[in-house]
Amino acid sequence: MRRQLLVLLPFLLALSACTGTTGSQPGGPVTPSSIPIDIGPSAQVTGNTMPTGIVVDGKELVLFFWMASNVPVFAQAVRDTSTGAVSEDVGMCRGGTGAESQPPFLGLQQCVASDGSLIEFGAFRGEAARVTSEAEGTITEAFFARWNKDTITVFWLRRHGKPAPAAIFYPDRGETSPGPAEQYPLVTVYSTKGKAIASARIRPGMAEQKGG
């Protein structure tokens, strides 16, 4: 039996390498140290802010919420790692795409960073034990943290791969439409029992051109 296992082991390892879809990036629950953010008197930042540890060209992505008519609005900023200054100018992104509103998600976005990496982040109304993004056959684990003003989970990750395609404008129909769903990253949230409780793609919605 032992000899058979030793013979099978290289085959099983090779099979695992071929069929495994989990990326090497770590992930899981974290507790970032909140930092102050001031975006002006018209938008009051509420609750804990979440520095993500994702740094591009000396700028760290920070996620937070501000309130509009008692409704939390998901937003992002950057913190200069050398000075600590916080700005709403997310200059680390040279492109990217967002998804249309897909409850229970409060936001889903992909940023194409200036170094070519892909930064994906969002928020989910509910508790989460695991959050992943699946694209091109690879699953990447996200980091996530709880917003302290409501049952909302904020998540983020950084990976390498092909950016999600932009929506295409069709002049004959006068509308902008995304490509097939399978071309876009699939974000999935799991419960403590390992059950998928919500999923959505980082895929822009359709838009109709207005006016003449």
Image (cartoon, grey):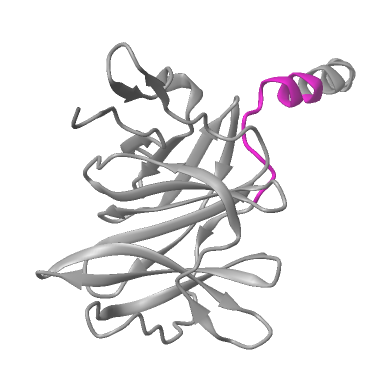
Start-end of magenta stretch: 13-25
What is the quadrant of residue 71 in the picture?
A: bottom left
| Image position, residue 36 (x, y; %) | 42, 87
Residue drawn at x 35%, y 67% is 146
Residue 21 on the magenta span: yes
Q: Position of residue 191 (x, y in %)?
A: 34, 46
Residue 193 x %, y %: 35, 44
Pick whichever, 54 or 172, lies toward us. 172
Q: Quadrant of the C terminus?
A: top left
Picture residue at 24% right of the left edge, 77% below the top: 43
Number of callouts: 0
- Is 159 contained in the magenta span? no
Residue at x 66% of width, y 49% of height:
25
Asked if 68 appears above or below 160 in the picture, the reply is: below
Q: Nearer the viewer, residue 132 or 97?
A: 97
Asked if residue 4 is positioned above or below residue 92 in the image, the reply reads above
Q: Is residue 62 left or right of residue 189?
A: right
Q: Quadrant of the N terminus?
A: top right
33 vs 181, left or right, is right
Of residues 12 and 118, the one nearer the viewer is: 118
Residue at the far left in the pictured view: 69
Establish if 169 lies above or below 101: above
